[in-house]
Image (cartoon, coloured by chain):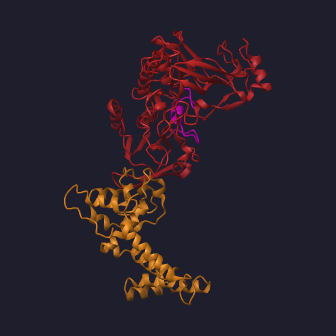
Amino acid sequence: MNAPSPTPTKKYDLSFARWVYDNIDGGDRMALCMQCGTCSGSCPIGTQMDHGPRKLFMMIRAGMKEAVLTSNTLWNCVSCYNCVVRCPRKVPVAYILHDLATVAVREGYAEARNSDNARFAKAFWWSAAKYGRTDERLVTGKYYFSFGIGEGYKRGMANLPIAMGMIKTKRMHLGMPHKCSNTGELHKILAKAAEIEARDHGKQG
Amino acid sequence: MTDKQPRSRTIMVVGGGIAGITAAVEAAEAGYDVVMVEKSPTLGGRVAQMNRYFPKLCHPTCGLEINYQRIKKSKRISLFTLSTVAAVKGSAGAYTVTVKTEPRFVKTNCTACGDCGQAAESEIADPFNYGMKTVKAAYLPHTMAFPMRYVVAPEVAKTPEGERIKAACKIGAIDLDDQGSSFELEVGAIVWATGWKPYPAENLTAYRWADLPNVITNVEMERLASPDGPTQGRIVRPSDGAVPKKVALIQCAGSRDLNHLAYCSRICCLASMKHAAYVREQVAEAEVDVYYIDLRAHDKLESFMRRLKADPQVRFVKSKPSRVEPGEGGNPTVCGENTLTREVYARAYDLVVLATGMQASVSEDGRLAGSYDDYGFVFTEGETIGAGVASGPLDVSMSVQSATAAACKAIQVVSGVRG
């Protein structure tokens, strides 16, 4: 799985599409897509996606790897699962978008790495993996400062009144970050999961 | 059954729709005795419930009338209405079939004068019109009923109203003591022509058929457009009876959908194009949008599609709508993505018609036919003979062809020539 995806070199090159079918979560079902438009039509923010899932799937088949992995469709999905529930071919649309987003970051596409959702997801995962809990202050801080020190400070200050309000109503605390009871075990579990993913991801059946 | 001769040369046809009627008359005219079993009080089935057939837009009266004449002329066909097959024993050449008959409460001397209907006060939901209107508790199933005999609803048969209905009949054709019956028949072959039922539109929750009055199904559209339907053939919005100016026809409502019917129901594309034609014929200023995934108008049916495509007021939109929402004045708004332009649309309509697919109607009957495919349609193999839509989605002309083939197979079985 961690080998990079192939880049099509000529017209009608199916190498990228086949790689997606074999390596992306739900990719095997994506092969059954009949381009009906239910997913893009069901999407609550379908108008704010450059392509929408249906067109993105056709672009994968057309070998447009670059355009697919730099698309904002991967990042604008809000995981409402309307598309997954309604898809007449039972294509797990949202899973596919999420996994393609991971691929886009891993393969170093600037559009992906710099997207808001990628920054936030990274900060969220850092806290969840380290403490077994998400700490509002650390997640927000890490996310804001991913834009640089100046921008991070500016965004933090802009949200100060909200933070103060949350502290006052005990929705946010000031002490050490909350942790799950045994972070050592958590880290072992996550390491094992990463090992299994590297070994089995994309294997079918 | 390769070496033994069939014990009975009688052919049973289960179902009295266009396929059952065809199989029965074909076998009878070839010289075989036929027993027909029909669940409802009359022959005609789903075809009788249609306004017109595609592609020539003929009225079903034609086809049914001719076939009724053939049945009347034949001395070889025995018909049992209000009857179902309760059990099948034995094998090809020597079946023993248990038939169960529900009471009609009306004897064969009924002249269909209608006096009993006048006397009846209660109303019951009219299955012929898919419950879109009610009928009197003593009723003629429909204007093309065969046999042309009234039915008294079991709800009133044992009540004082039943007595009044009986008293109104001048020729004494009402028999309130009718208990129905159960009997056994020996037959050599069985043709399953049990037909179909519309896929339940309430399962398509995103299309809101259950709670938006101006969202109807294709079979309801047929009744709306029929001269003997609930509106005497005027296509109107159910909510207020207004003439619809903007109509949406949604294809594949249930069909080609793994959450509902995995298969293509085959007839809906043309049925919807026919509906577009109905609307355009009645309402000069009406605009009709047909939402589709693919248009499946094969062979000679393509000319019907071309005719509609030439009409500037009929628009074909390549899109499976994602949902229908209540809009202004309770009118439905159809939402989705146009897959050719990538436009995400939300358009308001006066009337939305869902092209719901065809479902086998026999799946719950104990699987008496023996062999079925994954979707519950009768699978013709070995001793099992399916005809018409019982064997898979077909249009009327293909059902007739399938029924003729089934009659031929049944004749082979009762003649002992099928190895």
A140 vs A54: above or below: below
Q: Give x and y (percent) for residue B81.
A: 61, 21
Identify which residue, B351 or B342, lies in the foreground. B342
Q: Say which of B411 and B167 sits in front.
A: B411
- Residue occupying the point 56% across, 24% down: B90
Q: Residue at x 58, y 36 (%)?
A: B364
What is chain A's hue in the picture? Answer: orange
The vertical placement of B219 against B342, above or below, is above
Q: Is residue B402 above or below residue B111?
A: below
Q: Main secondary structure of the magenta part?
A: loop
Looking at the image, the residue that sits furthest to the right is: B160
Query: Percent x, y for residue A128?
Result: 48, 79
Picture quadrant of residue A24: bottom left
Q: Is residue B383 above or below residue B170?
A: below
Residue B186: give x, y in percent of width and height. Answer: 58, 18
Chain identity for the colour red used in the image: B
Q: Which residues are magenta?
A: B219-243
Q: Give left or right: position of B187 versus B163.
A: left
Q: Residue at x 36, y 66 (%)?
A: A100
Q: Position of residue A95 (x, y in %)?
A: 42, 63
Q: Nearer the viewer, residue B208 or A11?
A: A11
